């Protein structure tokens, strides 16, 4: 093992993503047209979001993204969505009116703070092309 490049848990560590993730579940998240951030204590490996009731749901990785044009739209035809991404939070909002969502995530052992300086304006690459 190199003292210059110590091996351990981190964003580029393959083993951190090969093992089963720690469960994180949040049910009945009330949504309006204002962005709601769901923060995770560790970096995610996979996120599953379910549209439970109400209007279509916008899913994105920044508040600007779901308020602007950088989001994934969950409609009646797409009641669940799965994302294999490494993020420390996800943003949800109702497209119009109100909605309810549930969320399940697999967490790695990587502390969320390792993503805080990974993008142009901080966590979750907010401000990056395609994010917001």
Image (spheres, rainbow, N blue to C red):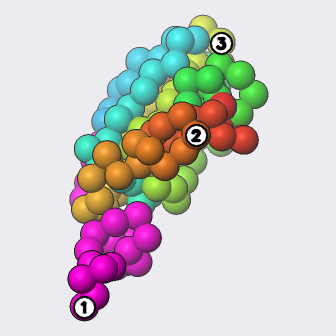
Question: Which of the two discs, 1 and 3, sits closer to the camera?
Answer: 1
Q: If you read the primary sequence from the N terminus, does the residue marked by circle 1 or circle 3 appear first?
A: 1
Q: Secondary structure at mark 2?
A: loop
Question: Which of the two discs, 2 and 3, sits closer to the camera?
Answer: 2
Q: Which residues are magenta?
A: 1-25
Q: Give the Cα distance between marks 2 and 3.
A: 30 Å
Q: Residues within 10 Å of mark 1 (few under 14, many from 20)?
A: few
Residue farthest along the top direction in this orientation? 97
Query: Is 77 rendered above or below residue 11?
Result: above
Residue at image point 55% right, 24% down: 63
Q: Secondary structure at mark 1?
A: loop
Q: Are marks 1 and 3 in contact (CB under 8 Å)?
A: no
Q: Quadrant of the C terminus?
A: top right
Q: Is residue 73 visible?
A: no
Residue at image point 41% right, 18% down: 30
Query: Is 77 rendered above or below residue 13?
Result: above
Q: Secondary structure at mark 3?
A: loop
Quadrant of residue 117 within the rendered picture:
top left
The x, y position of residue 29, in whole percent, is 38, 25
Considering the whole magenta stretch, tell me its main secondary structure.
loop
Q: Give the Cα distance between marks 1 and 3.
A: 54 Å
Q: Which mark is residue 34?
A: none
Residue, disc 1: 1
Residue farthest along the bottom direction in this orientation? 1
Residue, disc 2: 120
Q: Is residue 127 left or right of residue 122?
A: right
State the residue in front, 120 or 90.
Answer: 120
Q: Is residue 6 magenta?
A: yes
Residue farthest along the front direction in this orientation? 4
Q: Is residue 41 left or right of residue 93?
A: left
Residue, disc 3: 96
């Amino acid at each position: 093992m190199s003292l210059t490049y110590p091996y351990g848990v981190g964003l580029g560590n393959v083993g951190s993503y090969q093992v089963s993730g720690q469960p994180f579940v949040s049910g009945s998240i009330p949504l309006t047209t204002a962005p709601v951030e769901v923060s995770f204590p560790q970096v995610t490996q996979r996120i599953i979001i379910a549209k439970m009731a109400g209007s279509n749901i916008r899913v994105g990785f920044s508040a600007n993204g779901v308020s602007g044009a950088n989001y994934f739209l969950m409609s009646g035809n797409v009641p669940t969505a799965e994302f294999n991404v490494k993020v420390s939070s996800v943003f949800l909002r109702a497209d119009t009116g109100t909605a309810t969502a549930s969320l399940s995530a697999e967490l790695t052992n990587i502390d969320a703070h390792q993503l805080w300086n990974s993008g142009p304006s901080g966590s979750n690459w907010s401000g990056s092309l395609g994010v917001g």
